Amino acid sequence: MRSYDENMALKIILQAAQEYDVRLKNKQFLVVYRGKKGAETHCVGFRAINFLHLTGVETDMSARQFYAACINKRLSKRDIRVDGKGKVQQKLQVLPYLSALLYHNCMIGDFINSGIFIKADYFIGDTKAVLSVGFRDGRKEDIPVTLYNESVKKLSDPTCKVLAIFRKEYDDPKFDICTYLTSGYEIGRFPKVIRERIDDRVHFLSNKEILTEAKVENKVESVSIHL
């Protein structure tokens, strides 16, 4: 695994923050997956205050101050501390892929919790064993609590196929954008309780639109987001 110092970490964090701001911040995602009893769901949400913890770095700033500094590109290497060992290195390795996860084919499963102390209830991961994101169950939506450079199949059991992902702004009543739909599947096949949460005029993001959303102006560093 590559070792990141403060200079390298800063570039990764600033770029990831710009993408997080466009594609994740203040958005909720309805993840529909094939469970034991048919189609089941998890609703996950992302806030500005979640970003700091996902980077793994230490700072004297509050989570809100840290995020604002990232977005305004005022964060400096003097503001962060990077442990040369442990979890922070792994988080920095996969942080560039976070913003793209819920726009592609992925898998989901309950956390095995085999001796690993993580406050996560389940993981969502890509299909290439690059990134797995741990989520903790919440009242209105589940929140991201950790990143792993590991196959979701090794962290969860059972591991289920994600059928569709829908997105909305926090204050919107229904999910009005579909960011992913598995090939050959239709929304009409979902149970009524799921369909009622989706806007009748739902917009399906095309591959071109997904790539357009991923383009962040004034990029700090070119980082591939393709999983």
Image (cartoon, rainbow, N blue to C red):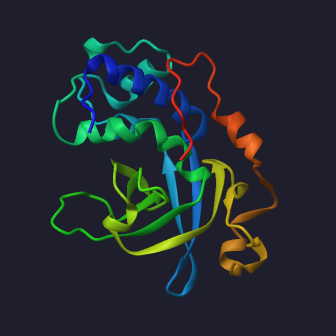
Q: Is residue 161 left or right of residue 52?
A: right
Residue at 28% in and 41% down: 90
Residue 65, image x, y percentages: 38, 23
Residue 97, image x, y percentages: 48, 41
Q: Is residue 1 visible?
A: yes
Q: Nearer the viewer, residue 20 or 153?
A: 153
Classify residue 40 by image quadrant. Answer: bottom right
Residue 34, image x, y percentages: 56, 77
Vertical placement of 96 versus 111: above or below? above
Residue at 42% in and 18% down: 69
- Residue found at the far bottom of this picture: 37
Q: Nearer the viewer, residue 47 or 17?
A: 17
Residue at 68% in and 81% down: 191
Q: How many marks?
A: 0
Q: Is residue 47 visible?
A: no
Q: Nearer the viewer, residue 222 or 180?
A: 222
